[in-house]
Image (spheres, grey):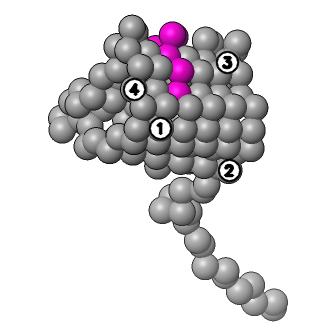
Amino acid sequence: MFLRKNNKLEALVGINSEFRGDVTTHGTMRIDGKFIGNIAADSVIMGENATVTGDISVRCIVIGGRINGNIVADEIVEIKPSGQLYGDIHTKKLSVAEGGIFEGRSLIQKDETKIIDFPNKEVSSK
């Protein structure tokens, strides 16, 4: 998930840090402390002690802490055993590990590019 060459760590909120405001980054954001605001990033990784209050728009996210807000993810939302999400999700893939908490609505969109339509063959009766 996080193996793209251009996907380096661009932003970090440390365990003893608190950030208020909105962040937009073209890379990975790691959160171990407290974040209040909206996030737009390629990827977000949240540690077990992390808390986010705000909406998140990403390609993919791994939740080990707590989020109070909505998530729009282009690819996947992964909630770890220590993860808690109180809000809505719109994504293609959702993974909630045993022990993970998700309270909200989820909209899982279909990947339209993988649908194969076979033409109908008409059967002639003889």
For badge 4, the amino acid type reads Phe
Percent x, y for residue 105? 74, 44
Viewer-closest of 31 and 100: 31
Q: Residue at x 25, y 43 (%)?
A: 26
55 over 123 or under it: above or below: above
> What residue is shown at x 54% (from left), y 63% (from top)?
112
- Residue sitting farthest toward the left: 5
Q: CA distance from mark 1 to mark 3?
A: 23 Å
Q: Label 1 is placed on what type of residue?
A: Gly
Q: Label 2: which residue? A: 107
Which numbered disc flags the more N-terminal residue, 2 or 3?
A: 3
Q: CA distance from mark 4 to mark 1?
A: 8 Å
The residue to which callout 4 is attached is 19
In the drawing, what numbered circle is on residue 93? none
Q: CA distance from mark 3 to mark 4?
A: 25 Å
User: Which residue is located at x 68 percent, y 38 percent?
Assistant: 87
Q: Quadrant of the N terminus?
A: top left
Query: Callout 3 environment at 10 Å: few (<14), some (14 to 19), or many (20+)?
Result: some
**C-alpha span from label 1 to label 2:** 23 Å
Residue 68 included in the magenta stretch of the image = no
The boundaries of the magenta stretch are: 47-52
Please name the residue that numbered disc 1 is placed on.
37
Mark whose residue sits in front, 3 or 4: 4
- Secondary structure of the magenta portion, mostly? loop
Dot 1 crowding, Cα within 10 Å, few <14, some 14–19, many 20+? some
**Amino acid type for the residue under numbered disc 2:** Leu
